[in-house]
Image (tube, coloured by chain):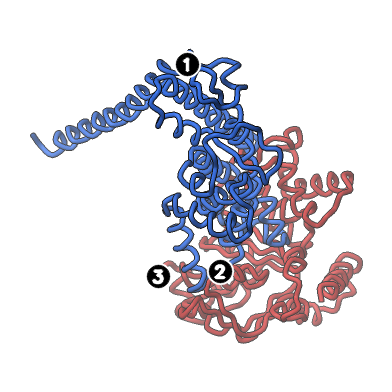
Amino acid sequence: MNNLQKNRFIDQVFKILGILFTMLGIFILGVLIYNILKVGVTRINWDFLTSLPSRRPEKAGIYTAIIGTLDLMLLTIIFAIPVGVGAGIYLEEYAKKSKFSSLLEINISNLAGVPSIIYGLLGLGIFVRFFGLGGSILSGSLTLSLLILPIIIVATREAIKAVPHSLKEASYGLGASKWQTIKNVVLPSSFGGILTGIILSLSRAIGETAPLIVVGAMAYVPFVPHSVFDTFSVLPMQIFSWTTRPQQGFAIAASAAIIILLIITFVMNGIAVYFRNKWQKKLK
Amino acid sequence: MAKEIEITMENIKSTKIDSPEIVDESTQQNASRIETKGVKVWYDDFMAIKGIDMVIKPNTITAFIGPSGCGKSTFLRLFNRMNDYVEGFKMEGKIKIDGDNIYKKKVNVEQLRKEIGMVFQKPNPFPKSIFDNVAYGLQIQGIKDKKLINERVEKALKQADLWEEVKDNLKKSALALSGGQQQRLCIARTLAVQPSILLMDEPTSALDPISTAKIEELIHHLKEEYTIIIVTHNMQQASRISDYTAFFYLGELIEYDKTRKIFTNPEKKQTENYITGRFG
């Protein structure tokens, strides 16, 4: 075999390996979804969505968990997005390069990798105890905001970095101030990337259980929260608590709740992807 | 400060337009739009400009030539303070435009850049419509009057010789234009702000010969109203369009004279070697 043939052969091998690994990932996901659907899909009905949790599996519903999840996500979005995007803009556009700023940079990247339970403990210490917010939706959403802030900051910075320098120069060259350039050139061009980062971070937040357990979310909340200071439950908590029960009925309910959680996640992502595509079309 | 600039520029413009004959030949000769004194520039520890004194006359085209890395672009970008955002940039010396030092502390940089337009090496239209590109500079000034914006956009596109090609498609994305059209759009965008000095950093280096010819012709017309400085790697271009030529080498201004003189009878050996293609 000469060199050219050898290179071609290696090329083919890697192509086939690549296809196999991709298929493997999709296959495993497919099996998981299939299993959950098989067990849980018949359990989903209007009553399941609108019933309060119960000791009897056939009567149990996820109403409070759904409302809790939606409330929690809404508050997290309100807290985390302005702070995260704002910090990203500051670090990328305003902060002068210095030892301090590179230290900040490294630490933010590291924070993105800190286990979520640690954030839970932080939330417990600061929001629950120090500020006396208790095991409330407010504590939970603030904790989740801290958790996803580094992801949003890093994504915002990467998206801003990808904006061609020539566009910024064009704007400055026409007499635009820094903020005008950010508002009119940088943010529109990086919106897609920032939105992708936000989607990723929210998808992570919606599935978190550990930090919320620490902060004090309940598995059994027989009422809908009326204010941000009320105690709450979320879907992952509900699922976790049901899977630890011995009764077969709760396993079915857990599967059904997982399907609902997946649907909420997909819908959330779908909305964001829709906006991103619409935006990119507008730019072209 | 900003106002002062405006007033002096108005004076120069009006004397030019109203009564060119009355202007004394000698004051015309001595008048300077841009004057630099002992300008030195560092990027961190690297010294990019090693002390340059230069006077640029109004309503002339001055070409900056020299091998890559000689500092000509850096020098050009001093005039609208475009280097301010470069990491590690440090500068010494004075640059006066119409008599005012633009590196004084209280200078309004945004105002300065409205007076001194810049066209870049690669066409860099915003990912917006053709109209919005040209209107950008006006909109950021807070001009809301639609009629005025429409007028200025049309005028700028006509000045840049692009109006006929795009007048029916002003809402179309600027990115759909060809490279040459994009560069003329960038020129129109700069002209719309009504500057009086134009800085051009290799404006045709990314373009084909036909687009280049169009832009050179355009630059030639613009000379009537603007003081133009153009950085170019193309000797023929420098000799075709410029009145004065400055040769830079390793951060120094080696020779600066009338273009005809530089290209026919340069004083310095280095200049001769460069323009005849023996190095660089």
Q: Position of residue B135 (x, y in %)?
A: 77, 48
Residue bearing the label numbered 1: A41
Chain seen in red: B
- Identify the residue shown where x is 56% and y is 70%: A96
Residue bearing the label numbered 3: B279
Q: Position of residue A211 (x, y in %)?
A: 49, 47
- Identify the residue shown where x is 56% and y is 82%: B40
- Identify the residue shown where x is 44% and y is 63%: A106
Between A7 and A155, the one nearer to me in the picture: A155
Question: Which mark is drawn over residue B86?
Answer: 2
Alpha carbon separation for disc pair 2 and 3 = 29 Å
The hue used for chain A is blue
Q: Amino acid at mark 2?
A: Val
For mark 1, name the chain: A
Image vertical order of residue B77 relative to residue A240, above or below = below
Q: Position of residue B58 (x, y in %)?
A: 75, 72
Q: Amino acid at mark 3?
A: Phe
For mark 3, name the chain: B
Q: Amino acid at mark 1?
A: Val
Between B20 and A197, the one nearer to me in the picture: A197
Q: Label 1 neighbourhood size at 10 Å, few (<14), some (14-19), many (20+)?
A: some
Alpha carbon separation for disc pair 1 and 2 = 59 Å
Identify the image quadrant of the C terminus of chain B.
bottom left
Identify the image quadrant of the N terminus of chain B.
bottom right
Question: Taking the image as drawn, is residue A148 in sight?
Answer: yes
Mark 1 vs mark 2, foreground winner is: 1
Between A135 and A212, the one nearer to me in the picture: A135
